[in-house]
Image (tube, helix red, strand yellow):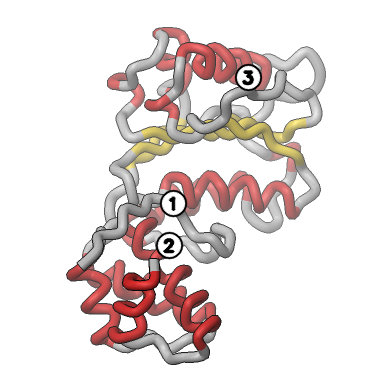
Amino acid sequence: MKQLALDIGLASGPTLSRFFAGPNEAALQHLRLWAGEGSQPDTRSPVPTYLWGEAGSGKTHLLKAVRQALSDQGASVGWLDASVASAAEFDERWAAVVLDDVHLYSTAQQAMAFNWFVNAISPANGAPRWVLAAGNLPPADLPLRDDLRSRLGWGHVFQLQLLDETARRAVLRQEADARGVFLGDEVMDFMLNRFSRDLGSLMQLLDQLDAYALRTQRAITIPLLKAMLESE
């Protein structure tokens, strides 16, 4: 059986409302306060927020969800992750700066992140901007330049916990329902037992399975899942 090595989030677009918090409720409520529906620019926190935890704990989902929430409110956001080769200079119109996968930043990306951070916290014009960042390690252990590492740990810090199997099943059921598809217990058992169990991988597998079922006009079953793998 082919093993899927997938580590990206929901293809349909992460939102704060679709984040299954489980043990991470405090972090979710914090982000809703500063970026959720009804939040106001003049009450947005000038104190940075840093999320850390293992791969699959939901960090990138939450960062993308915050970016989407602010965009829905008409705000622009500066985004930097390890895949961005050439980032833009700090823009005074940004309402926030979002830094993902900081533990993977190159020397040049660290310099850009530091520049954004300083300009966000002490801007030439206007009020301080919010900085939201995430990585796999706590701030003190990040393999980054000292001035950036210390700033990432200066404000609110939340450790995200991986969901247990019961919670992962609940998320799969919730996401299947959101797509309007039926995901039987036997298919869910197969997904959890045969593939990477981190939530990001499971969500991407569900996305692929849903798309394949639509193309073939078949219900989601174990034979359909096997057929999809064999077709790749």
Q: Give the side of residue 166 with respect to residue 80, left or right.
A: left
Q: In this view, does 169 lie to the left or right of 116?
A: left
x, y percent for residue 140:
31, 19
How crowded pointer 1 is (Cα within 10 Å; few <14, some 14-19, many 20+) is rated as: some
Residue wearing tag 2: 204
Residue drawn 33% across and 35% down? Answer: 136
Q: Nearer the viewer, residue 230 or 91?
A: 230
> What residue is drawn where x is 22% and y is 78%?
189
The three-letter amino acid code for the residue at tag 3 is: Trp
Q: How far apart are marks 1 and 3 (CA)?
A: 25 Å
Of circles 1 and 3, the one toward us is 1
Identify the image quadrant of the C terminus.
bottom left
**Residue 67 sits above or below residue 101 on the image:** below
Mark nearer the N terminus (1 vs 3): 1
| Mark 2 and mark 1: Cα distance apart in space | 7 Å
Quickly name the residue at label 3. 116
Q: Quadrant of residue 4?
A: bottom left
**Kind of residue at badge 2:** Gln
SS of the residue under disc 1: loop
Q: Who comes first in sequence, dot 3 or dot 2?
A: 3
